[in-house]
Amino acid sequence: MIITGKHLNRRTFLRGAGAAVALPWLDAMKPALASPATNAATAAPVRLAFTYVPNGVTTSAWKPSTTGKDFEFSRILKPLEPFRNELFVLSGLDHHNANALGDGGGDHARAGACFLTGVHPKKTSGADIHVAVSVDQLVARKFDSVTRIPSLELGCEDSRTVGNCDSGYSCAYTNSISWRGAQTPMPPETNPRIAFERLFGDTDFSMTPEQRARRTAQRKSILDVVNSRTQRLVADLGPADRRKMDEYLTGIREIERRIEMAEKDNRSFTPDMEKPAGIPALFADYVKMMFDLQVLAFQADLTRVSTLVVGREGSVRTYNEAGVSDPHHPLSHHRNLPDNIEKLTKINTYHTTLFSYFLQKLKNTKEGDSNLLDRSMIVYGSAIADGNSHSHVDLPVLLAGSGAGRIKPGRHLQYEKGTPMTNLYVSLLGHMELPVEKFGDSNGRIANLTDL
């Protein structure tokens, strides 16, 4: 074996007409005979992701009855049991600033706005919205210079961003959990086609929708326009890297195929039906597609941080696929009626089942001698605990992944009453090499994440 000392740049892109495909982390990106310091600099990155579910949960079917390593998974968490060793259940965390604090109604808007900021939003339905920068955007700023996309914001439910959506609170609060600044929400992209083009296409946003549609029709696949470059690159790679490239490019092609199928399905709708192109008819397929886009974005190191809003606060989506035809938000106000509680629990369990798909996808995606789940930290939860009372204490919160060994999952942790959710964010920022003393209403770091 001859070692030349040459290596592939981490920021290599396969470019073609209207396309730029980033590469996954490959062994060839690690310089031969490099020093330990150089190897550390080219090590695979740690990612941070947030998955938000609306309207709270059935708290009695969420919280495990025991703490520590050997806790029993509750009914809602049962779909996640295969990930026992890669998961924290974090109980006792609060979002105090999602409470009214003299502002009256609007718990759903405050929950959405507070979830990643820890700040009480200004009550207004006008343009003078005000909250704070969110934790994901702090991470986006840090890695802006080393990733193609600072952050990825996705959603599975379209909503207005202006006007009154909750008791005098702007729709911006219910629509966006990510905030670039106090007055600048980052609305989630809900169309998989647009999200895909943002990740993998050199999209010219000066073009009209008709021009973009014509260009898309002229090329069968983003991978087709970079095919010759791909063949030349793969020919110089080792067997392990060739396998990784094949898996990665197959994943891109599969998402393209699913988006195209969804668009073809949409052509069967009558013209007056408002349904964005590229959104699958089945909600499960929709959510899984958005999870897949996050996996690909992490795999190619296009971004280090992402958010997914499974449903906006106050969502009235129905879940026929889960056997529930009633709208979600009214069910969350169950009034302690057993039938309503049962239906709400089914919705909550459906959400965790979909989340388990994301975790499995990350775990199946190899990176170096590990996988994407191991090299990520993923928060799942809501800023409302019990939707019936609009409580913001003892929130339903999960943390998956180990951040490349920086945290030690596999436990149910119970925190003292009054522990701010933002303490978790202070700790996570530290593990993303972004140490801060305070964030939102935090009063320190969260304990026990690094214990065995």
Image (spheres, rainbow, N blue to C red):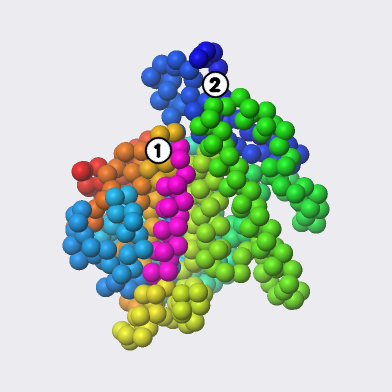
Magenta span covers which residues? 348-367
Q: Is residue 83 left or right of residue 164?
A: left
Residue 434 visible within the image: no
Q: Earlier in the sequence, mark 1 or mark 2?
A: 2
Q: Disc 1 residue type?
A: Ser
Q: Is residue 265 left or right of residue 417?
A: right
Q: Position of residue 430 (x, y in %)?
A: 34, 39
Q: Disc 2 residue type?
A: His
The quarter holding residue 431 reads: top left
Image quadrant in which the C terminus is located? top left
The quarter holding residue 24 reads: top right
For numbered disc 2, what is the local secondary structure? loop
Residue 25 visible within the image: yes
Please state the total of marks drawn on the protein image: 2
**381, above or below 377, in the image:** below
The residue where tag 1 is placed is 370
Q: Position of residue 173 (x, y in %)?
A: 49, 63
Neighbour class for label 2 at 10 Å: few (<14), some, many (≥20)?
Answer: few
For image coordinates 45% across by 47% down, the residue present is: 364
Q: Is residue 395 left or right of residue 167?
A: left
For image coordinates 67% across by 32% down, the residue present is: 231
For image coordinates 20% across by 53% down, the residue present is: 69
Is 134 contained in the magenta span? no
The residue where tag 2 is placed is 7
